[in-house]
Every structure is written in C-alpha cells, then in structure tokens.
Amino acid sequence: MKTFCGRANPTTGSMEWLEEGEDYDYHQEIARSRYADMLHDKDRNVKYYEGIRAAVSRVKGRGEKAIVLDIGTGTGLLSMMAASAGADFCYAIEVFKPMANAAVKIVEKNGFSDKIKVINKHSTEVTVGPDGDMQCRANILVTELFDTELIGEGALPTYEHAHKYLVQEGCEAVPHKATVYVQLVESRRMWSWKKLFPVHVEAEDGEKILVPPSEMENCPGVPSVCDIQLNQMPSSDFTALSDVVTMFSVDFSKPVQSASTYYRVQLEPVKSGKAQIVLSWWDIDMDPSGMINCTMAPYWVKPTSALQWRDHWMQCVYFLPREEPVLQGEKLYLTACRDQYSVWYNLQKAREGENKADEEENKADEEEHKAAVRVESPVCRCRAHLLWNRPRFGELNDQDRTRQYIKSLRKVLKTDSVCLCISDGSLLPVLAHYLGAKQVQYLVLFFRSLHFSLFFKANHLEDKIKIIEARPELLKPSHLEDKKISVLVGEPFFTTSLLPWHNLYFWYARTAVSTHLASDVTVLPQSASLHMMVVEFQDLWRIRSPCGTCEGFDVQTMDDMIKDSLNFRESKEAEPHPLWEYPCKSLSDPQEVLTFDFTKTVPQHCLSTEGSVKLLRKGKSHGAVLWMEYHLAANISVSTGLMQLSNEKGNCEWNPHCKQAVYFFSSVIESEILSDPTAVTYAINFDTKTGEIAMDFKL
C-alpha cells in the first residue's frame, strides 16, 4: 500500500502530495512522536506509578482481583507498573500497530507476558466476554489520553465508551480526576497573535494610518487552541486581571459525558484593564484523596515548586472574541464552551443590580437550559485567520520589523517606480503605495489573499493597488499594462513554508517573472543568507534522547525503534521549532554558510559549502540551529533566527514570529577544555532543482 504525504515544494510555493512507500507513514509518526519526551517526564511517571500502586492496593484491600484496562498503552509502561504493583491481569490497548508490536516486545523483555495482554485495536472496538478480547470488565481504568487542552485527543468519548462497555461500575481510575484552571489577562503581545493593529507610515504628504477592515476587527478568529510553553513568557508581557480560578473538572472514575456543554464561573477582576486572553492549564489527581497531583501550572502560580519541563503537555492561550474593558471588583461571568475535542471562551458582564436571589434564579434557569443549549464554536469570517497563523499576525504587528521595510522602501522607491509585490498576505504593497510608488501591483498566489480586497477597500486603496491573480510563470505583459517592473519586492513570506529556506520561493518567482523586469530593476530583498550555530539546549534535547530504563523498566526497544525511524530519513533532515519557547546557549559563533543573490536568477547548478565551526564554550553539542537573514537594502537586514547573543554566557534571543530549523546531532559531544577547541565540520548543499537543503555534520 502506498502513502501520500504532503510536502512543501519551495520551487513552486505550493503543497504537493508525494507518493511514499508503505513504511514511510509509520516511520514519520514514530520519528516525530513525543514518546521520548513522555518517558523523560519524571514527574508524570512517578505520579502515575504512585497512583497505580494506590489503586491496586485499594482493590486488593476489598478482597477483589485487580483487573486493569490501560487505554493507549504506548510502550506498555503503565501496564507494567500495574503488574509490578500486584495487579492480577492487565489489558493494554494500543491502536498504532508498530507501537503495539513494540509494547509486546517490551512487556516480554521485562517478564510480564503472563500478566499483560496487548490488544492492537481502538478501544471502541474491544470486545468483552469468554470469546472476546477481554475475559471480563476491568475494575481499574488507567489511561494517558491527554493533550495540552486535556480533551483534544478524544479523551471524553473514549472514557464515555469505556465506562459503558469495558469497566465495572464504581471502578478505580488513574488518573482519578482532571481539573481545568483559567486566568483572565491583558497582553498586547498575545493579543497581537489574533488582531491586526493599525500601522503608522510617515509619507511625503503626512502620516498615513493603515487600518484593518471591520470584518477582521469583529471576527472571532479560529477555534483551535494556541498551545505554548507559557513558562517562557516573561511576566512583563502580560497583566493578570483575575486570580486563578477552577473552570471545570472531570471525574474519570464515574461515567463521563462527551456531549457538547458549557461551564460558567463568576470572576471579579483584581485589576482594571482590557480583558483579551484566557490562559488555561490543568492538573490531574492520581487518587481520590488528591494527595498525588501532577500539574501543568506555569511558573507564577506555584513559584516555590520546581517546574517539570515537558513538551507533550504545555499551557493554553485562548483569545476572547472581543477585547472587553473591565473594572477592578466588577462582577463578570466567564463561560467555557466545549465539544468533544476543543474548548473556547466568552466573557459577559453581570447585569446591573443583580442580587443573590437573581443569582439563584439564574442558576436554576441555567441548569434548565444547559441540556438544550447549542454550543457553536467560533468561525473565522474575515479569512485572515485562515491565511495567517498566530505567529504571522505577531510578525505583521511587529513595529520594529515594519520600520526596517519602510526604511528600505524609502531608499529604493522613486516617483516613477512601477512596483510588483510577491509575498502571501503582505502589507508591502500598501507601504509601497504610501511611500510614493507610481504604480503598485500585487501578485496573489493560489487565491490566498482574497481577504485583501477587503483590506484595500477599508483603506480606500482598491483603485490604487492592482491585484493580479496568476502564477508568476503565467504573468503576461497585459497584466502589467505593458510596463516593465522597476522595483520587485517581497518580505518574503509564503504560507506553505515549513523550514526557513522554503521562503526562497521568492527567488524562483523572481526568476519566473524576469522577462517582465526592467534592465535596472531593484529587487528587495537584494539577497539572503543562511546562518548556522551549534547549541546546547536546556530541555529540547529530551525529545530526541534515548531513555534506556524508565522507572526501573527496560524500554530500550522503544529507543531502537525511534532510532530506526530517524535513520529511515528524519535524522538527515532539520525540523522546525520556535526557539523562543526552547532556551539554548550557543557553543559556537553564528556563521554565514550560504548566500542567495536575488538580483540574479536561480542558477542551474547546486550551491554547496563545506567548512568547520569551532566550539568556544563548555557544554553539550545537541545540534545546530539554522535560519535565514534577508538583506533588504544597503545595511538593512531582517533575521528570521538569532536576534541577539549575550556573549559571556551564550544565551540566545530568537525571532519570536518564526520557527528556526534544528538539526539534532546523532551523538552528543561535551566540550570541556577550551584551550584546544573542538570543531564541528559541516557540508551543506542547496539543490536548486528541488529547493531543498541537505546537510551533514561531523563532530
């Protein structure tokens, strides 16, 4: 059986479906999985083990046999914990075949084959009875089905089905309960991931203000959660408007309802401000007493306790449909709506003069209406939230970055400039018009910028900027009114780009339109360069690090499986990560390794480079980070990667709007003695036919 996989093609700027061998999907899934991250999550593993021991002992204390159902067993770790805690038998369910096969081997290697049966099925297909997958219903339910949002991986319907068909009434559950917490905040930084702010441009004829259309202003955005490492968000970037409050909880030991519903809590702001964002996280109690607790709370909630780093469970940022001004001490109602897989929030102000009796009456009304309520998730109506992801909104709202483009456009534009812009959903055509270009055309790819006509309309520019809907290679002189382009501009940014160099599609587009360019054309940016630096990660290394043993159980089989899958292809490739969320320190100086000259067309031959980089600091070389820099005009550049390096310690500040490329080394070297610096050699090849970069590093 063949598998079709979507891959960005940097030479066409589009997503293409490639046919891969049947093994590819499995290897991709395993190589990119977070199994290693979970196995390294000491806090999670210890708490699960404690909770399982306590549940087995409670069942045994009642004189019953302990029969465990473990849904989503993965490596079989939780089932082995149960068996070693004295469970009589465990049914371990795993739907992903390669993982189920690995679990069988791991269980056997650890000597639990007689106590654990691995079932390669979805839990909803498991049968119970003398001829079924399970001989009888279980009395202990163990699961790890949670994502950052708690319910995004289908935990609710899975629990609902298990209680109906697979476990006994009144069973023990590990975890026993999950609780979701929220905090209302004001944050210009996070709000800039949802809204487009006005842009101020100093033009010849006074200040111009570029405003977003009302459709965009009033749009609730997309319902998908924004999950980030909130522990990397400095406290100076947000203001807490409320205390942390409990939003809702789910008791997993009782039947669970997955039908859409809502929860409402009353809030009193501790500070006046603009309510924009709901921050949220959860914790799980592994036992009914609440003594064994595993929490995702960020640093400011429990400042005294040590934080466990994990990437499989983070924290959630939810955007309110509108910004609401709130006053300290006023009464507010925060509503969380959910369907089976996602949560979204609304904020209402309490009605004037609402007293205790009204509240009681409202509560009764609410319960009555709860069953009948239609919970509808927000839908983007302006299309901008479908075209731009959250980091892109942040990038467009970055005033320092916009200033660099304004500064360079000022240098290159003349009153007779005929300008063509090639970039997805870009503000550059508007900036070029305001800064005095005679004629501005905007080449829109794949109808990606339909919402831009609204944008031009809101700023009375519909007759000033011409939108051309055509692929670059299909551009005709008639599109350009038979004029030659004197200034070609791009940020460059394309929505299909996954890795930093995928935006080099601008170079391919520039090559495709070269017959339409004036002989003395100015291209902005004039060139780009690829940069590289060797780093030690504070924590991100865990997602690639072998585990060996986990809580005394041998999981080497899993390590080998991940390694085989990485060797299948992934280990030869870099992967995208937003490094502002993943602290690291540089062990080498940043180094420019390749340059791309946009004043010329893409060459036929490959661009290759070899060299070495010296390790200047003590530390573990986990990998290399790569990023692009765009040279807009003389002495004006923008970086998609390193923004600042503090030289003493090597701490790095990364561009928060872009993902950088991370190439994990297959083995880690520790540089200790700096009198004789170690060097890392590299070979990097840019294939101009495919637009892809292949790389190899030797330590």
Image: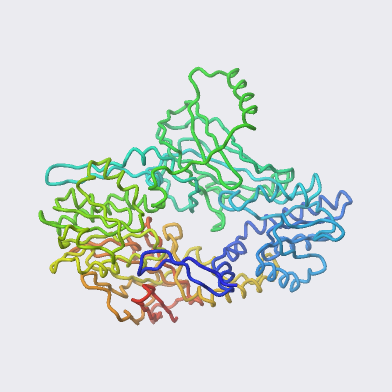
Report the quarter where the N terminus lies: bottom right
367 with respect to 61 (left or right): left
Q: Nearer the viewer, residue 461 or 639?
A: 461
85 is higher (above) or lower (below) than 586: above
Is residue 610 at least partly visible in the picture?
yes
Residue drawn at point x = 48 percent, y = 65 percent: 6
282 with respect to 644 (left or right): right
Instruction: Tell me which corner region of the image, top left, top right, bottom left or bottom right, holds residue 501.
Output: bottom left
Is residue 236 at least partly visible in the picture?
no
Q: Position of residue 94 (x, y in %)?
A: 69, 62
237 with respect to 79 (left or right): left
Q: Position of residue 291 (x, y in %)?
A: 69, 46
32 is higher (above) or lower (below) than 667: above
Q: Nearer the viewer, residue 2 or 385?
A: 2
85 is higher (above) or lower (below) than 396: below
Instruction: Tell me which corner region of the image, top left, top right, bottom left or bottom right, holds residue 590.
Output: bottom left
Q: Residue furthest right?
A: 63
Q: Position of residue 132 (x, y in %)?
A: 82, 60
Residue drawn at point x = 86 percent, y = 50 percent: 61
Q: Nearer the viewer, residue 133 or 352?
A: 133
Instruction: Tell me which corner region of the image, top left, top right, bottom left or bottom right, holds residue 655.
Output: bottom left
Q: Residue furthest front?
A: 478
Q: Describe the colour scheme in one phrase.
A: rainbow
Q: Position of residue 622 (x, y in %)?
A: 47, 71
Q: How many marks?
A: 0
Residue drawn at point x = 12 percent, y = 43 percent: 205
Report the quarter where the C terminus lies: bottom left
